[in-house]
């Protein structure tokens, strides 16, 4: 989800809710402690130099059980970050601490935001020698006569 998308969604919500990948929800008393821009400048295993920029939201739970972040307040935080930091319309990455800091992509299901697990991948698989995944097929699905196949106890193996 891009920053422009969350800005379009927030005015239509009564509450801001984030659902974890396991279906549970971030507690209602969470805080958005940071909105920022993170740039990653790196070289992949194939030698290609790359840059990625994301808008980062950091969610945090405190012992402030009466706290409830309203959509209008989050929108104001986003607008302030655009004005003061020059944040652009990039994809949003959400940081949230459970056992350790987790990084998630963000989607919206029509009623609340959903934290989507991020995965790693080789960006230069053609250059680093990783073979393409082979399709697994059961031998019985290849067809042919049963006489051409070995059977247990048939003595052909």
Image (spheres, rainbow, N blue to C red):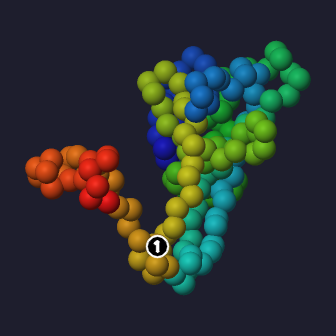
Report whether 61 appears left or right of 130. right
Q: Residue at x 61, y 44 (%)?
A: 104
Residue at the left extreme? 145
Q: Residue sitting at 55 percent across and 40 percent down?
A: 116
Residue 66 seen anywhere in this rendered image of the structure: yes
The C terminus sits in image quarter: bottom left
Q: Toward the viewer: 66 or 25? A: 25
Q: Which residue is mark 1?
A: 130
Is residue 155 found left or right of 29 in the rendered image? left
Residue 85, given in percent of the width and then of the height, sits at 68, 56
Which percent across, then down, holds residue 34?
Answer: 75, 45
Task: Name the side, left or right, on which 151 lies relative to 142.
Answer: right
**Looking at the picture, how far across and down is residue 50, in whole percent?**
54, 74
Instruction: Choose between 66 and 119: the one closer to the eye.
Output: 119
For residue 7, say whether it is visible. no
Disc 1 secondary structure class = loop
Residue shown at the point (54%, 84%) measured from the top left = 47
């Amino acid at each position: 989800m891009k920053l422009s998308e969350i800005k379009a969604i927030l005015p239509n919500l009564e509450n801001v809710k984030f659902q974890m990948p396991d279906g549970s929800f971030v507690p209602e008393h969470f805080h958005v402690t940071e909105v920022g821009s993170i740039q990653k400048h790196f070289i992949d295993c194939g030698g290609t130099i790359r840059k990625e920029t994301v808008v980062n939201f950091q969610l945090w739970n405190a012992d402030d059980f009466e706290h409830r972040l309203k959509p209008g307040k989050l929108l104001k935080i986003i607008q302030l970050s655009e004005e003061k930091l020059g944040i652009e319309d990039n994809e949003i990455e959400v940081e949230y601490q459970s056992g350790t800091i987790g990084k998630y992509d963000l989607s919206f299901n029509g009623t609340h935001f959903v934290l989507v697990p991020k995965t790693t991948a080789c960006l230069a698989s053609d250059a680093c020698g990783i073979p393409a995944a082979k399709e697994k097929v059961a031998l019985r699905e290849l067809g042919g006569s049963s006489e051409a196949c070995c059977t247990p106890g048939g003595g052909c193996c």
